[in-house]
Image (cartoon, helix red, strand yellow):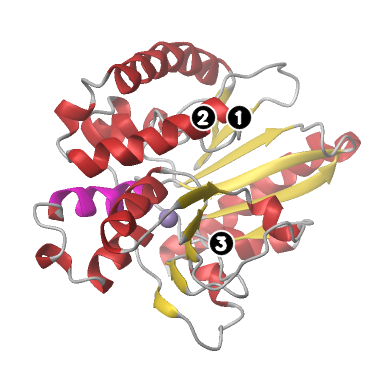
Amino acid sequence: MRLFLKVDFDAVISAMLLKKVLPITEIHFIAPLDIIEGKIKLQKGDVVANLPYLEGCEYWFDHHPTNTLEEPKDYKGLFRVAPSAAGLIYEYFGGEKTFPGMKDLIVMTDRIDAAELTIEEVREPKEHLLIANTIDSKTFVPAAKAYDLRLIEIYGQTQDPERILQFPEVKVRAEKFQNRQDYFRTMLKRYTRLEGNIIVTDIRFCRNFPRGDRFFVYTMFPEATLAVKSFHTKQEPTKAIVSVTQNIFNRSKVHVGNFCKNYDGGGHEGAAICRFPREDADRMLKQIFAELNDLDKESSNS
Ligand SMILES: [Mn+2]
């Protein structure tokens, strides 16, 4: 059976569980763009996890609320809005009876995938959260893929994070992450400020801004309720891209997906994207800071 996943920590744990109960022969990590472009052709026996339903698959496991839009006719597996796909797979195949000793790992996978973390955990990622940060979910080079497959194998042997962090390939990546993270935090602080209840990061004019832990920004201003990040991409040379998210430590009641629909974008309740023509972006950013601060005040009083 071939297994298709969107790569992240949830996917690694999902694959590890599925390998224990199904005769998985191949694992394919795919990008959402592959689906949009119709590159994925499925056949009977294929398993899809942590992704929207794909026509033709035999098993489907997913937990993302936005993936319910088209209810598939018949499939084996489990779809429900839940913290993680791994949690659903664990439940579907019999929980502790089938996967003895894995309860703690499943609880942590739920928390990581649903961003239900404490400030201390985000400030200093340890154990499974540190391992999760060694996974590169944005690039699809062969070395990253080989590492993801290796990590699935390692988690199949042991679920003890201290032991896993001793494997040389994991250790080296964890150390790299921690070194990169120091630089990332320095740069993030330089480009981030507070506007009312909004954490504002503007990296439109910064070249090669480093990638890092997306949750760290919320620890800088834990009392703020929203975060807005503006940036440029090569793919959209005339637009400024603006992400709007709720602070995971102090969530605004504003539905940011609905908010962004007014500005050439959309998304979920807690995370969304909008777009402005680059020449208007300064003015539009000021406008959305004012609107979001007003909406946030109104909704927190109601
Ligand atoms: Mn997931």
> Whole-percent x and y of residue 119?
28, 35
Q: Are marks 1 and 2 in contact (CB under 8 Å)?
A: yes
Residue 18 shows up from this direction: yes
**Snapshot quadrant of residue 106:** bottom left
Q: What residue type is labelled 3?
A: His
Please determine whether, in this image, residue 41 is positioned above or below residue 55: above
Residue at the location (23% across, 24% down)? 165
Q: Is the C terminus in the top left, top right, bottom left or bottom right quadrant?
A: bottom left
The secondary structure type at the circle numbered 1 is loop
The residue at which mark 3 appears reads as 268
Q: Which residue is at 43% across, 45% downward? A: 247
The kind of secondary structure element at disc 3 is loop
Some atom of ligand 1 lies within 8 Å of the CB belonging to the residue at label 1: no
Q: Does the magenta stretch include residue 112?
A: yes
Left or right of residue 111: residue 220? right
Q: Distance between the residues labelled 3 and 2?
A: 28 Å
